[in-house]
Image (cartoon, helix red, strand yellow):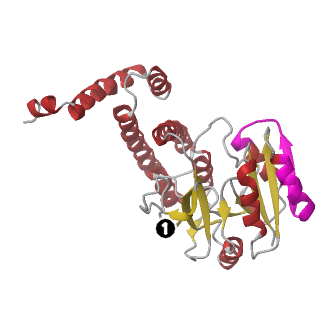
Amino acid sequence: MKVSIVIPSYNYAGFLGNALDSVMAQTWKDWEVWIIDDGSTDQTQEVVQQYLQQDHRVHYHYQQNMGLSHARNKGLSLCTGAFVQFLDADDLLSEEKLRLQVKHLKENPEVSISYCQSWYFHSNTPEQLFEDLELKNISTLPIMDCKGVELVRSLIKRNFTTVSSPLIRRDVLHANLKFPESVSNSEDWYFWLLCALQGDQIQYLSATQAYTKIRVHGGSMSQQKLNMYYGELQLRQWLKSQLAQADILPKDKERLILLNQAYEEKLFEHTMLTGPLWNFKHLKKMYQLSNFPRVIKYHKLARRHQRFSTNPTFRKTNTP
């Protein structure tokens, strides 16, 4: 049973070869890989050409720069396999991943999506593996075997894995199930929520030889976090409307909507309290994600919070 691997790439020529090598090393040999070049201006085509000449299972599609979600959706439209594996151009698959997850799905026909362990590594030290994005070795991976309301509830609380961890049955990926092309953050979280809302079952595969390795690049971690917060707030607005339209029992629907609302409120407050208090772009973004009175309310709280946390005298005189 063929596995279709979709690799979107934009100016990642320096990493793409490693990703493709991890595909070539798979013990499961019935696969095809689609490299979707999203308008790269580096040496991506030259890198890909070497693999095209080596192996007929490697395919290449070039497009003008349309964004990550569009590239993944294009890859989906070109797939011919029974299963689909997404892989970012800078990440890696373990040699046994496809074989073990194909076996998992074949033995469990009720399961739509099999997912496994994700390890993180800093680009400069690939031999050191960590369990979390911040490289603190704090495990954040939920172990799930569920569908329906239970799965939606779990995904409201948090995204459950990285995009390259799951192996997905192709037949659940109908024409209306796509990555959202109007957002630039948390695209995979939207995708898993859509799978959950259509009733797909997700199950964790605990085999230690099945895993993906996620590359962590340098840069401002604080800005990366802030962008993730913006993305999640936008997702929760979208999810509110999705839940309102979902084919779910009214009692369950109400509880899910309230749960999502509670997480959105908590995140909005956290983003205001910890974000750059006097940065116009930040405040404008928060206004776009909510409304003016709410931003003013939390800006006032944020000013007090920052005075309290940075001024010992203020902290002492305001302590009961």
Q: Position of residue 275 (x, y in %)?
A: 39, 32
Instruction: Please indicate whether residue 278 sits to the left or right of residue 151 in the image.
Output: left
Could you tell me if residue 260 is visible in this image?
yes
Disc 1 crowd, CA 10 A, few/some/many (<14, 14-19, 20+): some
Picture quarter with the N terminus: bottom right
Q: Position of residue 315 (x, y in %)?
A: 15, 33
Q: How many marks?
A: 1
What amino acid type should be assigned to the residue bearing mark 1? Ile
Q: Position of residue 3 (x, y in %)?
A: 78, 66
In magenta segment, residue 220: no
| Range of magenta residues | 45-70
Q: Nearer the viewer, residue 241 or 82?
A: 82
The residue that mark 1 highlights is: 143
The answer to whether residue 210 is above or below residue 257 is below
Instruction: Please indicate whether residue 4 sits to the left or right of residue 95 in the image.
Output: right
Q: Nearer the viewer, residue 133 or 34?
A: 133
Residue at image coords 75%, 76%: 27
Instruction: Please indicate whether residue 197 sits to the left or right of residue 3 in the image.
Output: left
In magenta segment, residue 56: yes
Could you tell me if residue 56 is visible in this image?
no
Q: Position of residue 158 (x, y in %)?
A: 47, 52
The answer to whether residue 116 is above or below residue 183 is below
The answer to whether residue 19 is above or below residue 145 is above
The answer to whether residue 316 is above or below residue 56 is above
